[in-house]
Image: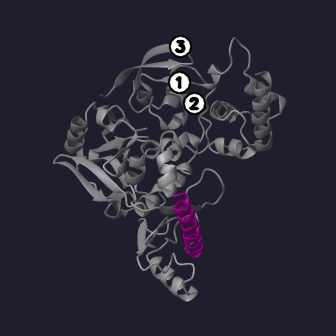
Amino acid sequence: MSGRIPIQVTVNGRARAFEVAAHHTLLEVLRDDLQLTGTKECCLVGECGACTVRLDGRIVDSCLVLAVEADGGEVTTVEGLASDGRLSRLQGAFLDEGAVQCGFCIPGQIVAADDLLRRVARPTVGEIQEGLAGNLCRCACYGQITAAVAAAAAAEAGAR
Amino acid sequence: MHPFSYERPATLARAVALLEAHGPEARVLAGGTDLIIRLRDGSLAPTVVVDLKRIAELEPGIREADGRLVIGATTVMTDIAADARIRRRFEALAEAAAVVGSVQIRNRATLGGNICNASPAADTAPALLVHGAVVVIAGPSGSRRIPIDGWFVRSGVTTLGRGELVTAIELPLPAAPMGSVHLRRTRRRGHDLASVTLCCGVDASGVTRLAYGSVGPRPVLAVDATGVLADRDAAPDARTGLLERMLAEATPSARSMRASPEYRLAMLRVLARRGVDIATARLAAAEGRR
């Protein structure tokens, strides 16, 4: 297969069918073809986590996934976390805790933190740091980011 | 990224035929966490990329068969680190898989990819050496098995031949309890490549297996069958001399940016002693549970 390859991917709950070049990454297709620019392009070597999305239930660096590899899969980007225009509890906690400075890394941080909270309802500080070890913040808001994830977990537990 | 054609074979036979036909012009895609970086930076420019993830025979998974634990080559680090059998009986491998990259990388990076990429810093390599792993290979003339100790040649080079690919990694289930551990030094906590990586395994008969990486072109296995290293009552000089001989194959490069050769060699000795102590303690704990 070369040239354009037809693929089907469910993105943020919506089934999409389109054609991609074999050498285009999931990141490029999300941003350039689907205009989902919440997912950020940064290091392109899987170190910074700015391009983190959930693919088939697990977070990945979308800069290291070819778009064709996602064929038949389900992708959730940061745009898929808010519902009906309302921020998720986790997104709200990032604002409340002042965890957003320049904001560039935040979509990746939030998708990774959302994944962590799906796996571990009440993570310890160590578990939050490990869960977000693949997401760098050059404003160094790590303290506030960790606090936001812990606050969201506590709020979720309180709401149940 | 340089354009290439993409192949998604449905059978192992088709994958082998593609790899044989294209030879060095083809690259295998499993998790992609090494390959896609190198496709983008241009250090690899294959004409064909062969994706292994839709091959029925290569479904990821871990199963027990004939006294071995068989780990499918496309099994990702997340699943290896979480597997109860690996955590209980192959602790060094579980610990190694748990520190590869980040959550995002571990969700993609496969065990087969880690050994085929053959980085001297590969975290799983010393663990597989300590556990006596066997690499299962499919190729044009059928399948073959080779011990992991005969697999690594140098950075990026293995004994895999044209048209061949790894289908599984087998771990012989030890007849007697074994204690093992994976240790490493990195520049920072969290997501980093190892400056030194070391695994130690001690079994009930007193045999100590030490394997280390990131200190030379390929990971090295050294075995002490005398029982001296695992013997807490052995003379300290005897243990030190033995350890020095076992670590003698470490030849770290002066060109690496991650750590100086002096630091690596010093830390290798620290990790080796620590590894023997932890593995011995874990063996005692395992024997206590029996």
Secondary structure found at label 3? strand
Would residue A149 be found to the left or right of residue B270 on screen?
A: right
Farthest residue, direction left: B141
Q: Amino acid at mark 3?
A: Arg
Q: Which class describes the residues within 10 Å of circle 3: few (<14), some (14-19), or many (20+)?
A: few
Magenta-colored segment: predominant secondary structure: helix
Q: Earlier in the sequence, mark 3 or mark 2?
A: 3
Q: Position of residue B85 (x, y in %)?
A: 47, 47
Magenta stretch holds residue B271: yes
Q: Position of residue B176 (x, y in %)?
A: 42, 62
User: B90 or B265, which is in the foreground?
Assistant: B90
For label 2, the residue is A53
Q: Chain of mark 1?
A: A
Distance from the alpha carbon under mark 1 to that under mark 3:
9 Å
Residue visible at 43% across and 63% down in the picture? B130
Q: Position of residue B42 (x, y in %)?
A: 42, 46
Q: Earlier in the sequence, mark 1 or mark 3?
A: 3
Residue visible at 31% across and 63% down in the picture? B150
Point out which mark residue A75 bears. 1
Q: Amino acid at mark 1?
A: Val
Residue visible at 53% across and 50% down in the picture? B100
Q: Amino acid at mark 2?
A: Val
Q: Which class describes the residues within 10 Å of circle 1: few (<14), some (14-19), or many (20+)?
A: many
Q: Chain of mark 3?
A: A
Give yes or no for contact between labels 3 and 2 (Cβ–Cβ under 8 Å). Answer: no
**Image: A29 above or below B179:** above
Q: Which class describes the residues within 10 Å of circle 2: few (<14), some (14-19), or many (20+)?
A: many
**Residue span colored magenta:** B262-290
For label 3, the residue is A14
Would residue B246 be found to the left or right of residue B95 on screen?
A: left
Q: Position of residue B124 (x, y in %)?
A: 46, 55
Distance from the alpha carbon under mark 3 to that under mark 2:
15 Å
